[in-house]
Amino acid sequence: MIILENTKYEKYVYGMKAKTLRYLIVLSVFYSISFSQQIEPGKFVSVLKYDHFTGETIYSRDYREEITITDSLHFKYRYVDDITDERGFGFYKQGKKFLNLDFTDITIDYDTLNYFIMDSSISEKDSIKLKFKIRDKEHVLQGARIEYIGNINKIAAGSDNNGNTTIWVSLNNLPGYVRVTYVGYDHVFITLTGPYNKVIQVNMDTPYKLIPKGKALTYSIKEVDIDGFYAKGGTFSEWTFFKREE
């Protein structure tokens, strides 16, 4: 009788252990699929070599591919080399071993303006004061040409060694628009209508080609972690590390 009871108890314990083990295995697989491979929002740039222990990074001098995950649905993309600058926007899908980029038209979620108004106030005079700061992504730009084309005449000025310039526009010369030009960069156009003094930062950008709606890129991915991930596909036929930059 005692032997029988012990046997039942042992079977019970063994059954509980087996159930617990199966549960832990399922839970482990679930977490590995659902979380360990998830690419968190950020900008990821292709590199030639990255040391995960020291952080030493070697970039290609000839080309660069950037994938920016902006949120749980959207991405921004850029490929640039010595003759090409392609950019795109859209929706992405990610699985455990793949990343799909489906390109769309630029939506309202993305700010494509190359300038922003730093300050604005209504003018109490018969003219408005426009202060400009001209720069690209890394430097201020000296010698940029700033033109105001109004309904009466045109006013032109150049940026100084700090990238700054100021022009005055008569209220009678409104409405109109500002055109900012610099060799090697796209023109920037700013429409002006009301009697407001403004401080405007202009961010010049190089010409680029927009990737059309309907195009898609598919990558195989692996080893996703906080530093980035390895990808093969798109531009690359070999496994390439995409390092998190921001």
Image (cartoon, rainbow, N blue to C red):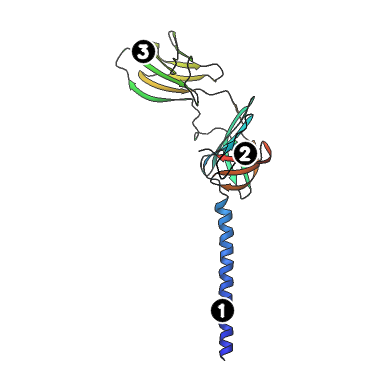
Residue designated by label 3? 171
Q: Secondary structure at mark 1?
A: helix
Residue designated by label 2? 49
Give the spatial CA distance, label 2 vs label 1.
54 Å
Q: Amino acid at mark 3?
A: Leu
Furthest-front residue in view?
A: 54
Q: Secondary structure at mark 3?
A: helix
Q: Is tag 2's residue or tag 3's residue first in the polypeptide sequence?
A: 2
Other-residue count near label 3 (Cα within 10 Å), few / some / many at <14 / 14–19 / ≥20? some
Q: Is residue 136 visible?
A: yes
Q: Are marks 2 and 3 in contact (CB under 8 Å)?
A: no
In the rendered image, the vertical position of residue 180 relative to residue 43, given as above or below: above
Residue designated by label 1? 12
Furthest-right residue in view?
A: 237
Q: Is residue 212 visible?
A: no
Q: Is tag 1's residue or tag 3's residue first in the polypeptide sequence?
A: 1
Q: Nearer the viewer, mark 2 or mark 3?
A: 2
